[in-house]
Image: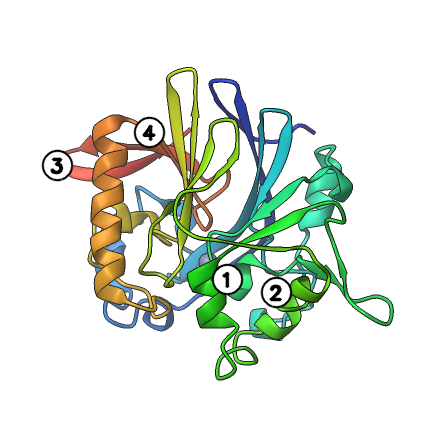
Amino acid sequence: MPGPVLRVGGIEVMEFLDLSMAFPFDVFFPQQGAKPFEPYRQLYPASFTPDGRFQTYAQAYLVRAGGRMILVDTGVGPGPHDWLGGARGRLLEDMREKGVRPEDVDIVVFTHLHPDHVGWNLRYEGASPQPTFPRARYYVPQADWEFFAAPERVGQWGTDRTVVPLRALGALELFKGEVRLAEGVTTLPTPGHTPGHTSILLSSRGERALICGDLAHHPAQVDQTSWVPAFDTDGAQAIQTRNRILDMLEAEGLVAVFCHFPPPGFGRLVRLERKRVFRAL
Ligand SMILES: [Zn+2]
């Protein structure tokens, strides 16, 4: 199965789903709770469970550009994950079903270092961890490295197991600001959700798309940009960045790609009865 593919000029973006998960709204969005989300249920049915919780997903994206294969994020990981009721990630299975092998990946780049974006980085089968993507350089936003690999946080977020060993394995590449990863593929700092949160700008033959990471978690946030999840490091900065980037995506007609929206996770921002709406492609 080829699976959902987005074409941006000569660039191809393939979506992988690691797993789906559900949370009570008042846990994920403690400032809002469930009620303000209700009016969006009809518009985004796949982002609600039947019993009114937040239904969400963990995606990764493979970008093929200029002869390179770039994996954006690596999902929640193999698990089983106790905090998700024993769920297991199926990123590698999904890749295999779509004809992509771990050794095909040239670059892994992270939107940020939260545990649901770095889960498949390493395999713990033998005496020491090995990179799951054996040929890849792993590109980590430096500001996130400084934050999540700091001694007081490295254990709390699991970074000690998922990210830090990449350094000793010689696979780690720290980056800052706008970096060109391949022809038409550039990193774009979008801080707030985490200090180094980064989006990936794709540009080819006059077409553009932005892999936005966790700029929004629930599609209602493209309209309600001031709704802040519990996990934003700097809520005020996250709102500012969300407004700036989503306004740009809407005004300039870019395709927006999110890491927690219902699969395939890519679409356009359009106006519908004065609301800004995410319309999946
Ligand atoms: Zn996330």
Looking at the rendering, in which quadrant would you find the C terminus? Answer: top left
Mark 2 residue type? Val
The residue at which mark 3 appears reads as 274
Choose mark 4 or mark 3, whichever is in front.
Answer: 4
Q: What colouring does the structure picture have?
A: rainbow
Q: Position of residue 14 (x, y in %)?
A: 58, 33
CB within 8 Å, label 1 to label 2: yes
The residue at which mark 2 appears reads as 163
Task: Name the N-terminal-most of marks 1 and 2.
Answer: 1
The answer to which quarter of the image holds residue 199 is top left
The residue at which mark 1 appears reads as 113
For ligand 1, tell me if the residue under mark 1 lies within 8 Å: no
Q: How many marks?
A: 4
| Spatial CA span between label 2 and label 4 | 31 Å
CB within 8 Å, label 1 to label 3: no
| Spatial CA span between label 1 and label 2 | 8 Å
SS class of the residue under badge 3? Answer: loop
For ligand 1, tell me if the residue under mark 2 lies within 8 Å: no
Task: Name the N-terminal-most of marks 4 and 1.
Answer: 1
Please report the residue visible at 33 percent of the width from the left and 51 percent of the height from the top: 190
From this view, report whether residue 233 is shown above or below residue 204.
Answer: below
Q: Position of residue 280 (x, y in %)?
A: 39, 33
Mark 1 residue type? Leu
Mark 4 residue type? Leu
Task: Name the N-terminal-most of marks 3 and 2.
Answer: 2
